[in-house]
Amino acid sequence: MSQVVPAHDSHANVSAPTYPPRSAVFGWILFDWAAQPYFSLITTFVFAPYFATHVAANPASGQAMWGFATAAAGLVIAIMSPVLGAIADAGGRRKPWIAAFGALFVIGASIMWIGKPGDSSVILPLLIAFGLATIGIEFATVFNNAMMPTLVPPERIGRLSGTGWATGYVGGILSLVLVLGFLAASGDTGRTLFGLTPLFGLDPATHEGDRITGPLSGLWFIIFVLPMFLFTPDRAAKTPALGAVREGLRELRETLSTLPGKPVMLTFLIANMVYMDALVALFAFGGIYAAGTFGWQTLQIGTFGILLAFSGAIGAWLGGKLDDRLGPKTVIAGSMSILLLACAVILSIDRDTLFFVFKVAPPMPGKLFGSPAEQVYLALGVLIGMAAGPMQAASRTLLIRLAPKDRITQFFGLFALSGKVTSFMAPLVVSIVTAVTMSQKAGMAVLVVFFSAGLLLLSRVRA
């Protein structure tokens, strides 16, 4: 177990701060690897579309219910993130918080195995389990992010963040390959993407290959988060638990009261609130939208996810280098412009129509991505992956460059707040519009408005 190191004093040893060895950085980077399968397998490419198309009555109502659950979890995260961040800054330690919320995530994810197809009695407990898992992994991420400034010099923060995101995407790719190639089978053929019978006797008829993604995500997290606990040093404990709560709440009140006097930070947090809201909804509903529009099943959506994650890994790695060279604001703005364009084009695609006017052949059963509309959607997925990773990685480095070093976890809490306080709003608005119009396309149109507003607000941030 690594030794606990004290936080750097802001007045002493400023000229030559010391940083932990590479093993500590490696352990920290693996947190993204450990967490990413939940987002790849559960919230985007496998379980969410499965829930909408096989557990819920129909894809539109499934999209709406999933959105309401995402919104509820986002509201809890929004309220509690800055409070917990302030308490952690006052107390000093981050690992105990990561362990506690990691355990909550594992429990919630494992319960998702109960989601049997066509069983309406499991819908509510399934959505509650999804909410618990989401809260756990998001809170654990807040405290993991706060460890970044103690690991590398400031001029390498962008590369560290980008490498973490890229590593996470690679973990997402491998988890998707594992599920699609060995566990999840087509209901028609009973075979996986590799033409195999599912391992462990998983039954394609009851979609056990889709449902196993919950427990698998939890097990994956337990295994790959261990190097962070073993090799990455934590800050020293500064205040006993009860005192840390009082001190943390006092500092949070002070920080919130001074935010109006920090217009750059305030504008950035509002901008992050808006564009991260749109990104959460885009990933939450991208697979569901494809399932409803093209009739994609797990194998098609999972393959789409592998392509998106692969492009995301490349984008995050390149984005980290561009971050250190051009600055995080430029990277965020460029990434958001690409996402805005991709959303606009998605709305112009239907089963047999491209760009609103061009009639094309519809998808053919048994032919993987054989129609022009599906191929364009694949290309848009690559663009989204290339842009999403750099935007998220550069956002946390911009926060580090703007925030006071002695309150970094607190500001990461506010960062999570800004990324979550309305993260329930975009899924909620998408869900409401979808439910009212019974049109998935009308619901997705909301994202164009959110991305446009985020880009406008970011332009006012003077980094």
Image: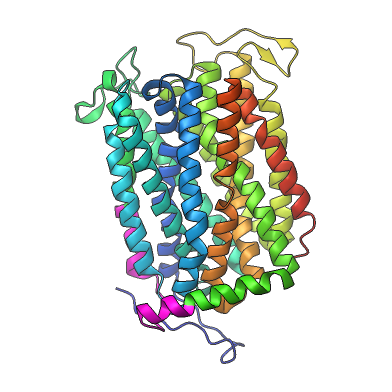
- Looking at the image, the residue that sits furthest to the bottom is 12
Q: Quadrant of the N terminus?
A: bottom left
Q: For this view, does 138 lie left or right of residue 229?
A: right
Task: Identify whether 13 is placed above or below 300.
Answer: below
Whether residue 237 is in magenta: the answer is yes
- Please name whichever residue, 39 or 186, is drawn nearer the observer in this view of the structure: 39
Task: Identify whether 372 is placed above or below 76.
Answer: above
Task: Identify whether 400 is placed above or below 452.
Answer: below
- Please name whichever residue, 249 or 401, is drawn nearer the observer in this view of the structure: 249
Write down the quadrant of residue 302 in the picture.
Answer: top left
Residue 217 placed where, x, y %?
Answer: 34, 44
Residue 71 placed where, x, y %?
Answer: 51, 43
Whether residue 15 is in magenta: the answer is no
Write down the quadrant of residue 438 in the picture.
Answer: top right
Magenta stretch, residue numbers: 222-247
- Please name whichever residue, 143 or 260, is drawn nearer the observer in this view of the structure: 260
Residue 430 placed where, x, y %?
Answer: 59, 33
